[in-house]
């Protein structure tokens, strides 16, 4: 988890680093974070995509790790919605591989467990 901030943003938002790696796409691609659409300064009912943004995201932003904060610039708002859902996907101006090399890891994916849960959910319908 990390915080992001853009000019004009008086508050701070929490975001999650997305793990976009798979067998065909190693960590060399861009890094993305998922956050609330309101963090992208959206108006209610607005949807935006592929918009340049200015700001930064800081990782390790916890009271007991302030000396370990690492900040990176934002590159673009890839997709954001203030209509129905309150989500935004923001591309960072750094690769996922570079973040991983600096010790910043996306949350662990538990695909096997999710599939198991999905199977149970489907059978309950």
Image: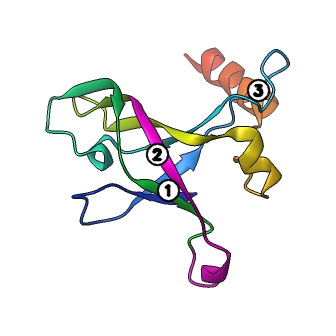
Q: Would you place residue 52 above or below residue 1 in this image? A: above
Labels 1 and 3: the sequence-earlier one = 1
Report the front residue among 3 and 108.
3
The secondary structure type at the circle numbered 1 is: strand
Kindly identify which residue carries mark 3: 116
- Whether pointer 2 and pointer 1 mark residues with C-beta atoms closer than 8 Å, the reply is yes
Q: Residue 80 or 75: which is nearer the viewer? A: 75
Whole-percent x and y of residue 36?
A: 36, 45
Residue extent of the magenta highlight: 62-78
Q: Residues within 10 Å of mark 3 (few under 14, many from 20)?
A: few
Q: CA distance from mark 1 to mark 3?
A: 34 Å
Q: Quadrant of the N terminus?
A: bottom right
Nearer the observer: mark 3 or 2; the answer is 2
Q: Residue at x 14, y 39 (%)?
A: 43
119 vs 35, left or right, is right
For the point 35% across and 34% down, the residue is 52
State whether residue 16 appears in this view: yes
Is there a contact, CB below 8 Å, between mark 1 and mark 3?
no
What residue is pinned by disc 1?
57
Q: Nearer the viewer, residue 118 or 125?
A: 118
Q: Residue at x 18, y 29 (%)?
A: 46
Residue 102 rendering spot, x and y as whole percentages:
78, 57
- The number of numbered discs placed on residues in the rendered structure image is 3
Task: Return the residue at label 2.
Answer: 74
Work out which quarter of the rendered image holds the C terminus and state it: top right
- Residue 81 location, x and y as percent? 29, 30
């Amino acid at each position: 988890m990390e915080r992001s901030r853009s000019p004009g943003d008086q508050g701070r938002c929490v975001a999650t680093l997305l793990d976009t790696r798979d067998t065909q796409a190693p960590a060399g691609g861009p890094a993305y974070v998922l956050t609330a659409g309101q963090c992208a300064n959206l108006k209610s009912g607005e949807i935006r995509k592929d918009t340049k943004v200015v700001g930064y995201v800081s990782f390790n932003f916890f009271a007991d790790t302030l000396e370990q904060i690492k900040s990176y610039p934002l590159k673009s708002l890839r997709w954001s919605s203030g209509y129905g859902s309150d989500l935004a996907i923001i591309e960072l101006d750094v690769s996922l591989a570079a973040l991983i090399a600096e010790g910043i890891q996306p949350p662990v994916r538990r695909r096997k467990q999710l599939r198991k849960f999905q199977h149970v959910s489907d059978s309950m319908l």
